[in-house]
Image (cartoon, helix red, strand yellow):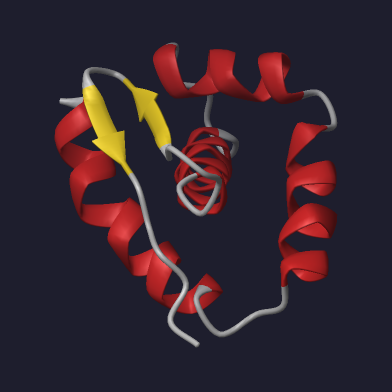
């Protein structure tokens, strides 16, 4: 079910990020990376008030990583985005 939810969320974030400069992507990834593993535990094991934000952080991270050369594979899905100039 997580992969299916990401199939819906990641493309929405990609569209938001497509307009931003690469420096902003790095800043956002750095922000998400703080305590990432602790946050991701909330995605798997529901924790009231934290699971939705953790899921959004995961979807945002995947969307940002999709702009990297070769994209990113996660939960059996592959996302690869080309920046439109």
* Residue located at (45% from left, 45% from top): 59
Instruction: Report x, y in % for residue 19.
Output: 56, 85
* Residue located at (74% from left, 42% from top): 32
Please tell me how many numbered marks the rendered image carries: 0
* Residue located at (72% from left, 24% from top): 36
Instruction: Report x, y in % for residue 10.
Output: 35, 53
Seen in the picture, residue 13 relative to 44 is either above or below; the reply is: below
Left or right of residue 11: residue 42: right
Q: Nearer the viewer, residue 6 or 18?
A: 18
Seen in the picture, residue 14 relative to 42 is either above or below; the reply is: below
Quarter holding residue 54: top right
Instruction: Report x, y in % for residue 31.
Output: 83, 47
Left or right of residue 65: residue 30: right
* Residue located at (79% from left, 54% from top): 26
Left or right of residue 25: residue 2: left
Q: Nearer the viewer, residue 52 or 49?
A: 52
Q: Quadrant of the N terminus?
A: top left
Seen in the picture, residue 39 relative to 29 is either above or below; the reply is: above
Instruction: Report x, y in % for residue 9.
Output: 31, 54
């Amino acid at each position: 079910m997580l992969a299916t939810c990401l199939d819906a969320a990641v493309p929405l974030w990609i569209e938001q990020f497509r307009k931003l400069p690469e420096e902003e992507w790095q800043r956002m990834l750095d922000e998400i990376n703080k305590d990432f593993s602790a946050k991701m535990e909330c995605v798997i094991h529901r924790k009231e008030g934290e699971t939705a934000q953790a899921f959004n952080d995961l979807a945002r991270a995947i969307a940002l990583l999709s702009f990297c050369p070769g994209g990113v594979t996660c939960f059996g899905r592959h996302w690869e985005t080309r920046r439109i100039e």
